[in-house]
Amino acid sequence: MSPVQTSSRVAALKNVATRLRIDSVRSTSEAGSGHPTSCASAADVVATLFFAEMRYDPRNPQNPDNDRFVLSKGHAAPILYAAWAEVGLLKREDLLTLRRFDSDLEGHPTPRLSFVDVATGSLGQGICAALGIALNARRIKSDYRTYALLGDGESAEGSVWEAAETAAHDGLDSLCGITDVNGLGQSGPSIWNHDMEAYAAKWRAFGWHALVVDGHDITVLMDAFEEARATKGRPTMILARTVKGKGLPLAEGKSGWHGKAFKKGPELDGVLKDLESQMLPEDGPAQPPDGPRTRRDMSRPQSAPKKGTVGTPAYKLGDSIATREAYGAALAKLGDGDDRIVALDGDVKNSTFSEKFEEKHADRFFQNFIAEQVMVGSAMGLAARGAIPFPSTFAAFLARAYDFIRMACISNVNVKLAGSHAGVSIGEDGPSQMALEDRARRRAQPNMTVLYPCDAMSTERLLELMAYHPGPAYMRTSRPKTPVIYGPDEKFAIGGLKILRESPKDAVTVIGGGITVFEALKAYDQLQKIGISIRVIDLYSLQPIDSRSLLRCARETKRIITVEDHYAAGGIGDAVAACVAGSNFVVERLCVRDIPRSGTPEQLIDHYGISSRHIVSAVTS
Amino acid sequence: MSPVQTSSRVAALKNVATRLRIDSVRSTSEAGSGHPTSCASAADVVATLFFAEMRYDPRNPQNPDNDRFVLSKGHAAPILYAAWAEVGLLKREDLLTLRRFDSDLEGHPTPRLSFVDVATGSLGQGICAALGIALNARRIKSDYRTYALLGDGESAEGSVWEAAETAAHDGLDSLCGITDVNGLGQSGPSIWNHDMEAYAAKWRAFGWHALVVDGHDITVLMDAFEEARATKGRPTMILARTVKGKGLPLAEGKSGWHGKAFKKGPELDGVLKDLESQMLPEDGPAQPPDGPRTRRDMSRPQSAPKKGTVGTPAYKLGDSIATREAYGAALAKLGDGDDRIVALDGDVKNSTFSEKFEEKHADRFFQNFIAEQVMVGSAMGLAARGAIPFPSTFAAFLARAYDFIRMACISNVNVKLAGSHAGVSIGEDGPSQMALEDRARRRAQPNMTVLYPCDAMSTERLLELMAYHPGPAYMRTSRPKTPVIYGPDEKFAIGGLKILRESPKDAVTVIGGGITVFEALKAYDQLQKIGISIRVIDLYSLQPIDSRSLLRCARETKRIITVEDHYAAGGIGDAVAACVAGSNFVVERLCVRDIPRSGTPEQLIDHYGISSRHIVSAVTS
């Protein structure tokens, strides 16, 4: 390009940025809330990205070869919407529906919108998802690039540094972060304010290529993106020094304007007048984003995905296998037939047995070391781009990623979580490793499937079902070996249960899950000897739950006893009580009611009141 | 000291380290599980710390002026126990009770032991707690120093970097971290292996003084601790290059030995023989830890703590005040009378109103920027040392610190959490900001107190009660303003409720909390007009819960309707159902059953089925 062309192009991009500011201000004022100043600091970066850097089909945001953009600082949603209006995908007048109940232009972006991969708004998550999106490019052998826009405030979240270390370790040079360093958080200056070298030193120490630039200089930004593209073997972070509220003199660089819309009337009019005066003369529009595709054919045919299968698991009745081991075996088989299946680990693959997947599919196995937030966040990104990710660790340590799981549910992506070593049945390691509230956490999310197989056969079957059931799902597995009780022809269903013992004269229905199923079966045998029949249920699907069967059993036996290797709240007891609420049934709960201590599995199962002895006692009392 | 004395002292310390290894190996072999190789890499560091560096009363680990030690790599618990046996606090033979049900020497350390401040075992948390412990020294004007021993594997946790940035920001030079860089994680090499400069660059970039040392050279370690003590204005991280399994030739530096005890018999005997051969001749014992106190008088008298009070809040019936604002006002007043009260923020003090506390007690207000894990982790440390910390942020973002809250419950420390902006009643910001499962998370912990005041008066009263109720507690506050309905003489209790409307002919008991109390009161008025009486309950204490009153109401009205600004699972519905399970009552639940979207508070409360209209409809159906 000649200097004239360049200067004309820069003027056009500056004007795009000004229009993005105008739209952000207008839409937030119309809504009466939102974050116009956080949009304004990012406007030049967003304009440059969308109109001079990214390659994508503006008519089809879901083209698998599009460059991807993740707005990690989700509160700047209005500028994202404004950019897609500028691109032509949204109507400009629709921007004024921001934050309205009848509009998909929500306060923070969600995947209701075709151009949003994952919901953001809980800070420090978008960069983790972007990492997963970048990993997905490797999976589908695409050279698309992934861009994530972060705030400086959110860089205080530890998850950002988990993403930093993992992306560097993976050598993800297709990932480019931009930090909008406007120096102001919500309640005061951000932790490192405008100390640009403090940011750069951190990213460099974590193995990234880092550049410090003026975030309001379009030419400098274009060069920075070019440098990022030319950087191989490591990701790039562009640290853009910006001014919060840039272009809005009333609020520019001032504290106290975070998350405040300008008042309609003279205040808004003045701001808009200021902005309009910033428009520059230009020769033509900014280079359209659907310009020549120099890097790749974006219309390659997509093959229809194929499903995998676990086949017929080779377990024999009575074999003794831990469900966590069956999990690994099943996942490896499922991956044979479906290259969308990927696994993510947090340095416990030899305990969760996800190493069985790695052995066969090393290119689809992603190691996150001991960093559960980025493991789940990255899985969100992978899922958003068509993969079926299985992040796994100890169930206790998934607690570390709880907020990410919450956002995965809001995004409604196919993240398939597995948590091993649940409950007091792990024994000597003690309460920090036990996960006695994992199902309370999962069940609290309305769209989360929650499974807990008791034997190897049901683990394999449920894993296959879970992989292809839409939306987020969780499988709890156990540490101890348990006997195989299901044959190869047994059918399972998401939302199902198994009645293992049943007779017309059952005095009580005993409902267990996982290891307590075996305690219930032991209790059955003991009670048979004294002439008492009980019904025994393996409630392997906690959410959805088979209310109809549970109600039938409740009607037939009147009394229900739930028994679970879990705290009192949020597990089988609560779920069953919710099913049968409104009827004349007694629900008694056997569960762990105190914070446990170390001991052998048998001691703990008995001491905390969930062993066969306690079931017998509850039935006969 | 003369060179002879020095060399003799070093030999004595080397022998302490060898004895710590012997005890760690013996105790784990006796238990049949545990992490002897993770102990062995840290033995020289621990020996130096306990016998050449730290100042503490070996007979009283709780002396408030003792230097503190936090084992962030909690799986190395056996060496911590061995060190206190070497000090003389534990009997050496008791070490062989490790991991037994009848022993307090659990698999990972818990505060059942006098020398453990906070439970560790979920990695990356101890350094956050240590930060809080170091802040506490400032609070009580003590010059005690705080030491935290981390693993290299755990340094991948983002929470470590949250602690890094916060401690540097606070200039906490009394905090000294030691990373035991043994290069091996559980399932393979740790993320940065033995690249010592990679670690050092990161800590330096985060503003710490960082030293790289040979973690098995006692003299070098003593010098490093001295350098740390001499470093002012910033914390120090000593990066100790070590060998996993050091001193145990069978496992030294080898993969595959993580978390494995040596088998009793020839394997163990061989390891112990190797260790015993490493004992050096020495002139006398290592300098005892209770040597001359050059830095401080450790026997200063302690004044009895004084309780604060909120006095008589000046609200008038009908005033309109958000409970989050009343929270801030009450906290500030409580802090006037009790210097144990401290507040921690995550850059939302102007939304949670914790800024009201900061205005009066800036020296006891700790800013963590947008880093919720370190906010709660640091509160754990403060609480363990006698403070009464109130960390607060949006209830949604406390999800980020879930695993820390889990560990705070295991530690049973006085962490008083407050989460604002709960539920769909926040309106336009959308689901990422809503916290619709916060009470499910809290209630799942057996010893967590869970409160949700509906008006400003009850907020102030409950805040005072919560501060002095032993153990962890959570208060949910709301964004919208609500009318004051309680007068200054109204009494509240942890585990109480208020019956707001009652008559002998009540058809239904309607149980709400927070903003739904007002929907229930509106429904009452509407139903009165058509001649239907309902009982209305403000269930401000969800855990503990007033089962007796709920059962009485259930018996009197038969029907119960719960209504809550929360998802179906884990909230009022489940809690009430658990109370009345086993009786002939109908429990109907009005709650948020889908993941919501943006809209006005009124639209959302109505659309998601928790408005007065829905209560009226449920009562009359």
Image (spheres, coloured by chain):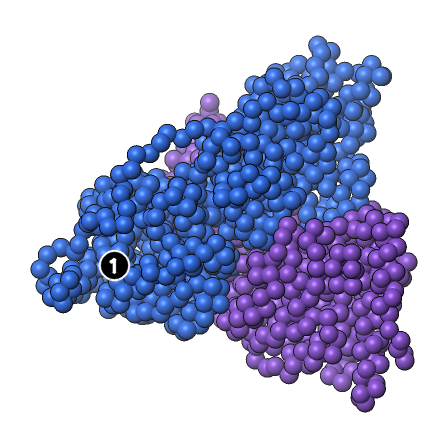
Chain colours: A purple, B blue
Task: Return the x and y of residue A264 as percentages of the image width and height.
Answer: 87, 49
In the drawing, does residue A546 fall left or right of residue A432? Answer: right
Q: Quadrant of residue B593?
A: top right
Output the chain of dot 1.
B
Judge by depth and name the residue closer to the eye, B607 or B498.
Answer: B498
Residue A469 image position (x, y, % from top left): 68, 55
Q: Is residue A480 left or right of residue B570?
A: left
Question: Does residue B503 lie above or below B142 as drawn?
Answer: above
Rendered location of residue A44, percent (x, y): 75, 69
On screen, residue B553 above or below A37? above
Residue at the far top: name it. Answer: B504
Question: Which residue does the image show at 55% across and 38% down from the upper left?
Answer: B360
Q: Give the quarter of the figure containing the N terminus of chain B.
A: bottom left
Q: Nearer the viewer, residue B584 or B175?
A: B175
The residue sitting at 67% across, 25% down in the picture is B315
Three-letter amino acid code of the residue under disc 1? Thr
- Left/right placement of residue B281 relative to residue A195 reads left
Seen in the image, is A460 located left or right of residue B209?
Answer: right
The answer, for residue A111, to whether it is visible in the render is no
| Disc 1 secondary structure class | helix
Badge 1: few (under 14), some or many (20 or more) residues near its Cα, within 10 Å? many
Q: Residue at x 24, y 50 (%)?
A: B294
Q: In which quadrant of the rendered view does residue B223 lie?
A: bottom left
Where residue B63 appears, as percent x and y from the top left, is 30, 40
Front in this rendered view, residue A483 or A528: A483
Q: Quadrant of the C terminus of chain B?
A: top right
The answer to whether residue A261 of the structure is visible from this angle is yes
Residue that appears at 84% across and 55% down: A27
Which residue is labeled 1 in the image?
B48
